[in-house]
Image: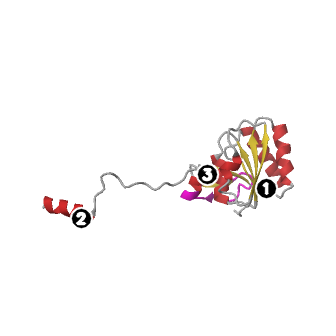
């Protein structure tokens, strides 16, 4: 499965499934077709996993006749793959149909099995993936914070003294 330079992703109510796909494939650029009812800014979600640019277009999520032209407009930008994980069903159907017509990979992340499936080229073996902890944190916009020592921590000197007392 080659690394896509330009990845077209379809986003529904939750951005994380397709953001995970972007984190795993590490495209140079992402075109995001986003459901109009999404309550997040996809640029914020993808900021740490996309190296160059995120282009966003909002569409009504259940109107295929509006979704298909939005996808097709961006195919002129040399899209090399499409991701449908987490997209509302009509958006995923529209993307799959266009991907099949154009012979583009249409990726779906099967999180249960830890694999990326190409829904168009079904004869290809799924790519088994493991996401790094830093990519996971960036997709969920979490940051590692150093933990203070526990209040019951002892010094080596205290442990030796306790060991001597116990005999």
> Is residue 111 inside the magenta stretch?
no
Query: From what the image shows, is residue 5 above or below residue 82?
Result: below
Q: Secondary structure at mark 2?
A: helix
Comparing labels 1 and 3, the label whose residue is closer to the camera = 3
| x 70%, y 41%: residue | 12
Residue topped by disc 3: 139
Whichever of callouts 2 and 3 sits on the residue coming sooner in the sequence is 3
Is the residue under label 1 in contact with that under label 2 (CB below 8 Å)? Answer: no
- Name the residue beneath numbered marker 1: 104
Percent x, y of residue 131: 58, 57
Magenta highlight range:
118-134
**Mark 1 secondary-structure assignment:** loop
Indicate the quadrant where residue 1 lies: bottom right
Residue 68, relative to residue 153: is it above or below? above
* Front one among 2 and 74: 74
Q: Position of residue 43 (x, y in %)?
A: 71, 49
The residue at the point 32 percent across, 51 percent down is 151
Between label 2 and label 1, give the one nearer the viewer: 2
Q: Is residue 20 left or right of residue 4?
A: left
- The quadrant holding residue 62 is top right
Q: Identify the mark nearer the N-term, 2 or 1.
A: 1
Q: Which mark is residue 157?
A: 2
């Amino acid at each position: 499965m080659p690394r896509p330079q330009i990845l077209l992703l379809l986003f529904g109510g939750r951005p994380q499934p397709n953001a995970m796909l972007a984190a795993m494939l590490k495209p140079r650029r992402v075109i995001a077709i986003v459901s109009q009812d999404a309550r997040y800014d996809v640029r914020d979600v993808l900021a740490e996993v996309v190296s160059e640019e995120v282009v966003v277009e909002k569409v009504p999520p259940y109107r295929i006749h509006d979704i298909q032209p939005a996808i097709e407009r961006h195919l002129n930008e040399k899209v090399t793959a499409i991701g449908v994980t987490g997209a509302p069903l009509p958006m995923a159907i529209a993307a799959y149909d266009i991907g099949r017509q154009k012979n583009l990979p249409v990726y779906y992340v099967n999180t249960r099995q830890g694999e990326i499936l190409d829904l168009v080229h079904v004869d290809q073996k799924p790519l088994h993936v493991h996401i790094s902890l830093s990519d996971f944190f960036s997709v969920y916009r979490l940051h590692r914070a150093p933990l203070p020592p526990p209040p019951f921590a002892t010094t080596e000197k205290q442990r030796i003294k306790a060991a001597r007392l116990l005999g």
